[in-house]
Amino acid sequence: MTGLAVDDAAWASAWRLRSPADKLLLSVGLVLCALLLPVWPGSLLVGLTAVVLALGPARVPARTFGRAVRVPLAFIALGALTTVVEVGSGGLGWAPDAAARAGGLVGHAVAGSAAVLLLATTTPMSDLLPALARLRVPAAVIEVASVTYRMLFVLLTSLSTIREAQTARMGHAGLRASYRSSGMLAAAVLTRSWDRARRLQDGLAGRGMETGLRVLPEALPSSSRFVAGTVAGLAALAAVSVLA
Amino acid sequence: MHIAEGFLPAPHALGWTLAAAPFVVHGARCVVKEVREHPESTLLLGAAGAFTFVLSAIKLPSVTGSSSHPTGTGLGAVLFRPPVMALLGTIVLLFQALLLAHGGLTTLGANAFSMAVVGPWVGYGAYRLVTRLGGGLLPAVFAAMALSDLATYVTTALQLALAFPDAESGFPGAAAKFLGVFAVTQVPLAIGEGLLGVLLFRVLTVNARPELVRLGVLRPDPERAEP
């Protein structure tokens, strides 16, 4: 399988059947808290809340969550380090408040990333995209995004299969061969995506598709307890951070 | 190279979102119009989005030893035009944020501005300029892909410099720092992406001629009977 670990976690999560709007409210609330509240103790609280909720009630595997949180760390570390190095008349040096500035940046960014991951690891894209209709995103755009989501796994599988075949034929031995193979790989995946779109189109036309791709929406009712808990929790978090 | 969630201060995140919005909305209008006139384009556009996402899973060996992935927005701009790429690029960025933890939600606007707006337009501009000067398809594709990648990275560096000006030397000093740090990985990557584009189009002009003609990249060949 060449599934994406975050997507697999989202489908298997204990919060999979919760309303996407509820989870969106929680995660976006946490993201905004991470962005707007002072880093101490706001970001710490947001980060902890996101991790505890994901690993606790939502039952996301700790391995998946940990790995995904690590992805943006390289950028965050490099970015924060570059920010606090100062270019002065005497060459490079540390900015006066280097440690505090770097700490603040890393805190905001890690807490924000954890809050986004809470949404990502509990809500599959196919649940989230229809929820965008409420934000007045045009139906045609949501359909294009839905096709993108459904097709990308097929293309990822093609990609890894072709790459495996190329590697087995020494296609990635050396820089030159590797570039040649990567070019052919990209071309093969692109032509396959066109071919697949055309065949899907033929199949749907044969079934009388005229007004777009109608998919029966799954009923995921909103829980008033969850919403009340989210609002109360976020308010408490904001109050503690502002007063502390 | 996407700006991570929470890295930009709130006013900057909001500002870049507002800056990217007109382009993305324009792209969405183009897509809505296209889909209304040709309902079958939904699937082709979806396929294009999926391809752009998957392209970032191709690891390019880099001269400096590290391996990086192409952004693919230059390619998309040549094949599907920049307005459509503004929307597809933003969708892909949203997917990367939510499926790969790459990028973020509040930084989506800033990332969309650099990767889905500036990159495609610079790439497309370079492509048109080189073809108009009689440079041929492959040099034009090289210019489009290398320059769109470079423009994306320069924009990201400038966005970071604006948000975090240097205490002593201000914005210019910060810009020099960020450009310098990212140049180590991004300049070889831009050249690599340009080469990948040339290799890709060499295969496409042989294997997928009718599709390239339909997209308007190649002129119909009078000597060959097109199906």
Image (tube, rainbow, N blue to C red):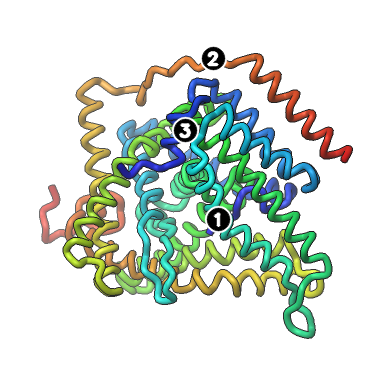
Relative to B27, residue A146 above or below: above
Distance (Cα) linking label 2 and label 1:
35 Å
Residue type beneath disc 3: Ala
Q: Position of residue A236 (x, y in %)?
A: 79, 29
Location of mark 1 (residue): B2
Label 3–label 1 contact, CB within 8 A:
no
Residue type beneath disc 2: Pro
Distance (Cα) linking label 2 and label 3:
18 Å
Q: Which circle marks residue A136 in the picture?
A: none
Q: Chain of mark 3?
A: A
Q: Position of residue A227 (x, y in %)?
A: 66, 20
Location of mark 2 (residue): A221
Mark 2 or mark 3: whose residue is earlier in sequence: 3
Dot 1 falls on a residue whose secondary structure is loop
Relative to B80, residue A205 above or below: above
Location of mark 3 (residue): A10
The foreground one among B216 and A154 is: A154
Q: Chain of mark 2?
A: A
Q: Quadrant of the N terminus of chain A?
A: top left
Q: Residue at x 37, y 21 (%)?
A: A215
Mark whose residue sits in front, 2 or 1: 2
Let me know if residue A197 appears in the view.
yes
Q: Chain of mark 1?
A: B
